C-alpha cells in the first residue's frame, strides 16, 4: 500500500501537517495589516490585539507588536510609506486550522507577495517504522546524506520526569533541518515524529510546492526529501548506494520529493533589501544625528577600496539595466 491508498480512505497510520509558519509582509496601513491577520484566523474564533507601544524581536527588531489569544504573534515597523511586518504562527496555532492545504492556497491567492521565511512540517508515524537505534547506527557509520551534520540530544521534557532522545540533522541556522523524536512524551501523540524545518529561500520553494498538493498527507514527501539513509559501503558514488531497508519502508508509504535550491542571484535589489531589513533604522539615526550624508561621503573612498568581486558584479548588472 502507498499514500494513494491512504487518500482513498485506507488508514496507513501516517499523518502530516504544517507545524510552524513565519512570514514577512508589507502593508499600506495598519488597517490592511489587521485585515490580513483577521484573514489568517478566519477559521478560528481568535482575538488579535495590536500593541503599538511594545517592541517585538524575531531575528530583527520591530517598533510595535501584535498577538492573539490562540498563538499568532509578530511585530511591525514603518519603512518609508509602507508598514513592514513579521508574522509568526506557532505550532499550537497552525495545528488548530482544520483544512491546512485549502488555508495555504487561499493565502497564496489573496496575498501572493507574502514572503515565507520559515515553515516547519511534521510527519507522525504511528506504526513507528523506523527505530531510534537504527538511526543511531546509521549516524555512527556515516550512512546518511543530504544533510552534513548529525547530533543526538538527550534532554528532559519540561512536563515529564523522563529523558527523551532527539536526533538532529543539519545546523539550526541552515536553510533546512530535520529532527526525529518520540512524539508521545512531547505532544501526547502515540507516534514517532520527523519534523522538518525550512528557512529562507527553501521555505519559499516549499510554500510554492504546497500549491500543487491536494491533501495534507502529501506534505510527507517534502519531509522525507530532506534526508536520505544509504549504505555507503556499496559504492563511492552516493547515487549508486542503495537505501537502508528501514528507511525505504517509510518512503514506500510517503514517496519522496527533493527541493532544489539554486544559487541566489547577485543584485543591487538584494543588497538594498538587506540594508532595509538590517541597518535602515541605524542609517536614519546617523543621518539625523549628523544632519546629512557628509560623514558617509568622507568614508566613501575607503569603502570602495574594500569592495570585492561580488560588489563589482552587482554594480555591473545595475548599470546594464539602466535605460
Image (cartoon, rainbow, N blue to C red):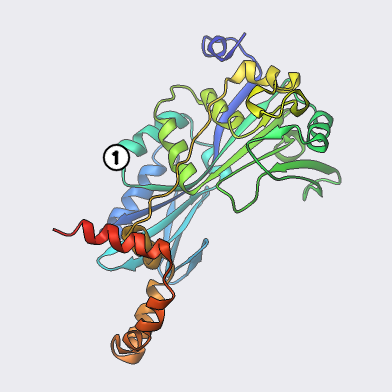
Q: Position of residue 321 (x, y in %)?
A: 21, 56
Residue 279 position, x and y percent, is 42, 72
Residue at image location 67% in from the left, 34% down from the top: 145
**Residue beneath the point at 35% across and 59% down:** 313
Q: Is residue 30 visible?
A: yes
The residue nearer to you, when weighing 48 against 244, is 244
Quarter of the image with the C terminus in it: bottom left
Quick one: 8 or 34, which is closer to the camera? Answer: 8
Residue 29 makes an appearance in the image: no
Quadrant in the rendering for residue 191: top right
Residue that sits furthest to the bottom in the current view: 290
Q: 111 above or below 228?
A: below
Q: Which residue is mark 1?
A: 110
The residue sitting at the left extreme is 323
Instruction: Tell me the crowding category of disc 1: few under 14, some 14 to 19, or many 20 or more residues within 10 angstroms, Cα based.
Output: few
Horizontal relation, residue 36 to residue 149: left or right: left
Q: Position of residue 38 (x, y in %)?
A: 37, 47
Relative vertical location of residue 305 with respect to residue 227 in this rendering, above or below: below
Q: Camera-side residue: 62 or 118?
A: 118
The picture places residue 201, in percent across and down from the top left corner, at 46, 46
Horizontal side of 94 relative to 162 (left or right) equals left
- Above or below — where is 310 with respect to 224? below
Q: Residue at x 83, y 37 (%)?
A: 140
Amino acid at each position: 500500500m502507498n499514500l494513494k491508498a491512504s487518500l482513498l480512505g485506507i488508514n496507513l497510520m501516517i499523518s502530516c501537517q504544517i507545524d510552524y509558519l513565519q512570514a514577512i509582509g508589507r502593508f499600506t496601513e495598519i488597517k490592511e495589516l489587521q485585515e490580513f491577520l483577521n484573514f489568517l484566523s478566519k477559521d478560528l474564533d481568535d482575538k488579535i490585539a495590536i500593541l503599538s507601544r511594545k517592541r517585538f524581536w524575531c531575528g530583527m527588531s520591530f517598533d510595535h507588536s501584535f498577538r492573539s489569544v490562540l498563538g499568532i504573534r509578530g511585530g511591525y515597523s514603518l519603512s518609508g510609506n509602507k508598514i513592514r511586518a513579521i508574522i509568526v504562527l506557532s505550532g499550537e496555532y497552525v495545528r488548530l486550522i482544520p483544512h491546512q492545504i485549502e488555508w495555504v492556497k487561499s493565502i497564496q491567492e489573496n496575498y501572493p507577495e507574502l514572503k515565507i521565511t520559515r515553515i516547519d512540517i511534521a510527519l507522525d508515524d504511528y506504526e513507528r517504522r523506523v527505530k531510534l537505534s537504527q538511526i543511531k547506527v546509521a549516524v555512527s557509520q556515516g550512512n546518511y546524506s543530504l544533510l552534513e551534520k548529525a547530533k543526538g540530544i538527550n534532554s528532559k521534557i519540561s512536563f515529564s520526569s523522563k529523558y527523551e532522545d532527539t536526533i538532529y540533522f543539519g545546523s539550526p541556522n541552515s536553510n533546512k533541518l530535520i529532527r526525529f523524536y518520540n512524539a508521545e512524551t512531547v505532544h501526547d501523540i502515540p507516534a514517532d515524529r520527523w519534523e522538518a524545518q525550512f528557512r529562507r529561500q527553501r521555505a519559499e520553494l516549499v510554500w510554492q510546492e504546497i500549491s500543487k498538493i491536494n491533501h495534507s498527507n502529501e506534505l510527507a514527501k517534502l519531509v522525507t526529501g530532506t534526508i536520505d539513509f544509504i549504505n555507503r559501503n556499496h559504492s563511492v558514488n552516493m547515487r549508486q548506494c542503495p537505501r537502508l531497508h528501514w528507511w525505504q519502508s517509510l518512503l514506500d508509504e510517503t514517496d519522496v520529493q527533493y527541493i532544489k535550491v539554486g544559487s541566489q542571484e547577485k543584485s543591487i535589489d538584494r543588497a538594498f533589501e538587506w540594508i532595509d531589513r538590517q541597518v535602515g533604522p541605524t542609517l536614519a539615526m546617523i543621518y539625523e544625528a549628523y544632519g546629512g550624508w557628509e560623514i558617509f561621503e568622507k568614508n566613501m573612498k575607503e569603502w570602495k577600496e574594500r569592495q570585492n568581486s561580488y560588489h563589482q558584479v552587482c554594480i555591473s548588472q545595475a548599470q546594464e539595466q539602466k535605460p
